[in-house]
Image (spheres, rainbow, N blue to C red):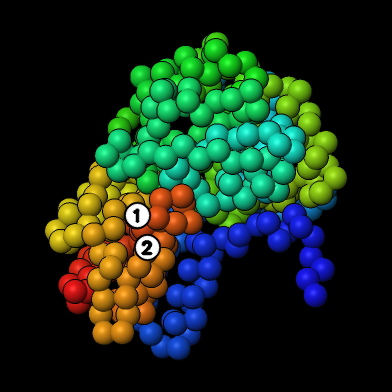
């Protein structure tokens, strides 16, 4: 008898974590698996940030912090938003959480009522729709395929808005596609949103610094919707600090107060030592961020070039993040031995078991015609992984 709550039963498990687990199991059996399923930098946290954390331990930063985070960290974030994004916030408009993931969920939970609609462009990060479900909202999926670079148009946004619409979740640079909205594209979306004052924007900008087209553009820059934009960001991707678990919400003070109220009841403030490390990340030298960005750009060029040489895969050129999202539907209906590929789930499992490369099916991201590869790994791994994928796909007839 299932005695779990309906809330829990309505959630899907994380496909990215599930694939990572499956590849770990094969590795444990001695299989040489190249894991392209995990969305985290393969670099180490820069030394000056680690030193700040060690100092924080010696300085006894071992007690509860304020729920929204230490004032010094929030002020460092205020400075970052001003210097890098040209946006004016106060420390009272910032709340730090246990990673950007919690911050997205906090924003959803404080804004969305049962029955509210939340517009989610697809392909989307696997957790967005599940967070909306957790808030008892209704995800409204707007599809943008590879032919439009996986980005929704103003017309598509306009068509998706109803009197029940409460929010749009926008991720740029995008997980899983690496697509980046230009200033002009964001202006088009902002013009639509300006006509619908009931719709908020949850802007997930966690991949801000992994950007190959120059300056990051935030949808919060448009004055007509600025008060309705909730920015989500953090240190995980830019500073190779995924395990430190520090993200932040920046938005209207009434929203941030609500986030603090919510967080105060279920986690309190994030890890004290991690906060001091994050403060050093924002206030310290930014050269390591650029060095990592350059490495990711080189790998992007490499994986795009090699994947374009695989017959049957359709590839766009991602402008940010560290993902490639090839279209693979030309393989549906093909077989190797007793294995038949009916969809991207089958293909991802085939590539893992036959090619020993872990990828994630696009179905989990709202696009069942594609699969996601993370190129946050060495050049050698990328070359070998695509060689194996090509070989495995050639066997399908």
- Residue 364, given in percent of the width and then of the height, sits at 48, 56
Q: Quadrant of residue 287?
A: top left
Pointers 1 and 2 in contact (CB under 8 A)?
yes
Do we see residue 387 in this rendering? no
| Residue bearing the label numbered 2 | 344
Label 2: element kind: helix
Label 1: element kind: loop
- Residue 294 bears which disc, if any? none
Q: From the viewer's perspective, is 230 left or right of 109?
A: left
- Residue 174, given in percent of the width and then of the height, sits at 43, 41
The residue lying furthest to the front in this view is 333
State whether residue 59 is above or below residue 258: below
Q: Quadrant of the N terminus?
A: bottom right
| Residue bearing the label numbered 1 | 369
Q: From the viewer's perspective, is 168 left or right of 270?
A: left
Q: Label 2 neighbourhood size at 10 Å, few (<14), some (14-19), many (20+)? A: many
Residue 51 or residue 340, whichever sits in front? 340
Q: CA distance from mark 1 to mark 2?
A: 6 Å
Q: Residue at x 65, y 28 (%)?
A: 164
Q: Residue at x 49, y 69 (%)?
A: 20
- Residue 121, given in percent of the width and then of the height, sits at 47, 38
State whether residue 98 is above or below residue 147: below
Q: Quadrant of the C terminus?
A: bottom left
């Amino acid at each position: 008898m299932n005695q779990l709550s309906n809330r829990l039963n309505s959630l899907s498990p994380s496909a990215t974590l599930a694939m990572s687990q499956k590849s770990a199991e094969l590795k444990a059996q001695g299989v040489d698996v190249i894991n392209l399923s995990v969305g985290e930098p393969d670099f180490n946290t820069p030394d000056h940030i680690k030193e700040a954390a060690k100092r924080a331990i010696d300085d006894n930063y071992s007690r509860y912090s304020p729920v929204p985070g230490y004032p010094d960290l929030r002020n460092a974030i205020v400075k970052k938003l001003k210097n890098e994004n040209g946006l004016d916030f106060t420390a009272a408009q910032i709340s730090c959480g246990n990673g950007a993931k919690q911050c997205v969920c906090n924003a959803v939970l404080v804004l969305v009522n049962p029955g509210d609609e939340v517009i989610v462009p697809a392909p989307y990060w696997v957790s967005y729709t599940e967070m909306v479900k957790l808030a008892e909202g209704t995800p409204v999926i707007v599809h943008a395929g590879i032919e439009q670079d996986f980005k929704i148009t103003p017309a598509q946004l306009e068509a998706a808005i109803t009197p029940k619409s409460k929010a749009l979740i926008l991720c740029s640079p995008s997980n899983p596609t690496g697509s980046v909205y230009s200033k002009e594209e964001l202006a088009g979306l902002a013009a639509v949103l300006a006509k619908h004052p009931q719709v908020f924007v949850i802007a997930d900008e966690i991949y801000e610094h992994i950007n190959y087209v120059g300056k990051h553009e935030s949808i919060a820059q448009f004055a007509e919707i600025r008060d309705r934009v909730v920015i989500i960001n953090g240190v995980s991707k830019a500073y190779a600090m995924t395990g430190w678990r520090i993200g932040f919400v920046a938005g209207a003070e009434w929203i941030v107060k609500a986030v603090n109220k919510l967080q105060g009841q279920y986690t309190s403030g994030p890890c004290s030592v991690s906060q001091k490390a994050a403060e050093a990340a924002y206030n310290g030298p930014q050269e390591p961020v650029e060095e990592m960005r350059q490495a990711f750009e080189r790998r992007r060029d490499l994986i795009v070039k090699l994947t374009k040489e695989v017959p049957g895969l359709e590839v766009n050129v991602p402008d940010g993040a560290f993902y490639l999202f090839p279209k693979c539907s030309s393989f549906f209906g093909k077989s190797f031995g007793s294995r038949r590929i009916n969809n991207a789930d089958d293909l991802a499992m085939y590539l893992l078991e036959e090619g020993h490369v872990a990828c994630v099916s696009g179905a989990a991201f709202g696009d069942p015609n594609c699969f996601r590869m993370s190129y946050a790994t060495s050049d050698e791994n990328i070359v070998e992984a695509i060689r194996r994928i090509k070989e495995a796909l050639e066997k399908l007839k």
